Amino acid sequence: MNINLNKRFLLLSGKLLVLLLTLYLLYQTIFFAPDTFLTWGGILRSALDSPLLGLLFFAALLIPINWGFEARKWQLLGQKLEPISFIRAYRAVMVGLTLGFITPNRLGDYAGRVLELKSRQRLDAIGAIFIGRYCQLVATVLVGTIGLTYFVLKFYWLEYPAVAMSLILLLLALCGATLLLLYNARAMVAIVAAIKPLRPFVRYVAVMGTYNKKEITSLLWLSLGRYFVFLLQFILLLVLYGVELSPLEYLSGVSGTFFLKSVVPSVSLLSDLGIRELSAMYLFGLLGQARLQVLSASLSLWLLNIAVPSAVGLVFVLRLRLARKGVAA
């Protein structure tokens, strides 16, 4: 028992250390002026007193819709292993979200969803979870490519046309590659099987090769639906905090932010807290927007879609039955 407690303490200490390093980087990037906190306080007060405060409540109302898309995806993915109702799928998503809250790249999400299954072969669901996450990545890459192309054309095309064209072609190639891999999931299983150290894990990802093109397309549409809910929430919060842009600039800035957040390697332990904020400040900074307004919107988005649902999911985690009926724990 003491050994487990010591391991848990060391794990939490390591996570806290990485989080503090991420926050320090944010601090170094933002808080360079002595009156920054006063300025930020004014921004928050202005938002709370704004006639547009209803945008915050609208964004909050979209939270269950956001995770509802994810639950529907998991319901479809999990059918390959056992029948799953939408309610069970939603609960599994909430459990995974809570466990993934404090793990790098949301790895706890795998454990949360696996534990909610009743099947004796529930570890075989790892491949299904991966396909779901990969579909979300593909949606992010596809829309993000459009957003980043806008920035490339606006800021680099005139002075560096060759570099700009190379970047655009690279983005298009990335889109093609991700789509090709998504619709050829059996190839991913074959790659795992071909690498000797990974062969013992083939059984856990083999389910990826069982989804047909129609199922993959449905999953991709659901991923795009969830993506645009997330995108709308971010835009609503940007408007609330006084970021004034054209519709195209809003879409490009947000989609570009999500793209960078997804492809840039991250060690943040609170669901990539830090990466999105730095990406958003960079892209919206190019558009002439104040960093604190953008940071406020990004942190609010994180609170709405990650922190709050994770707290709600804690209720399901505490009630989670690790032992299945008729199976020893």
Image: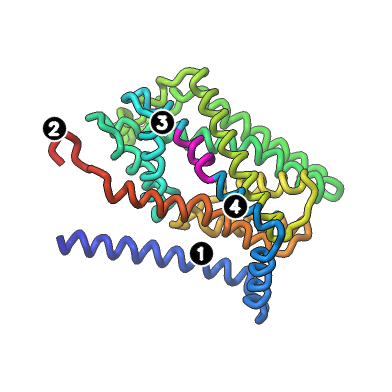
Q: Which residue is mark 3?
A: 86
Residue 57, numbered label: 4
Main secondary structure found in the magenta portion: helix
Q: Is residue 260 visible?
A: no
Question: Which residue reaches farthest right?
Answer: 158
Q: Amino acid at mark 1?
A: Thr
Identify the mark nearer the N-term, 1 or 4. Answer: 1
- The 10 Å Cα crowd at callout 1, few under 14, some 14 to 19, many 20 or more, is some
The residue pinned by badge 1 equals 22
Q: Residues within 10 Å of mark 4 (few under 14, many from 20)?
A: few
Q: Amino acid at mark 3?
A: Phe
Looking at the rendered structure, the kind of residue marked 4 is Phe
Q: Quadrant of the C terminus?
A: top left
Residue 60 vs 133, above or below: the answer is below
Q: Is residue 272 visible?
A: yes
Residue 260's spot in the image, x, y percent?
A: 61, 48
Residue 99 image position (x, y, % from top left): 36, 50
Tell me whether circle 3 and circle 1 mark residues in contact (CB < 8 Å): no
Q: Quadrant of the N terminus?
A: bottom left
According to the picture, the residue beneath numbered tag 2 turns out to be 326
Circles 2, 3 touching at the beta carbon (< 8 Å)? no
Q: CA distance from mark 2 to mark 1?
A: 45 Å
The percent coordinates of residue 276 (x first, y second) are: 58, 54
Q: Say whether disc 2 or disc 4 marks the residue closer to the N-terminus.
A: 4
The span picked out in magenta is: 63-71
User: Residue at point 57% right, 54% down?
Assistant: 301
Give me the C-alpha separation between circle 2 and circle 3: 25 Å
Is the residue 274 above or below the residue 112 in the image? below
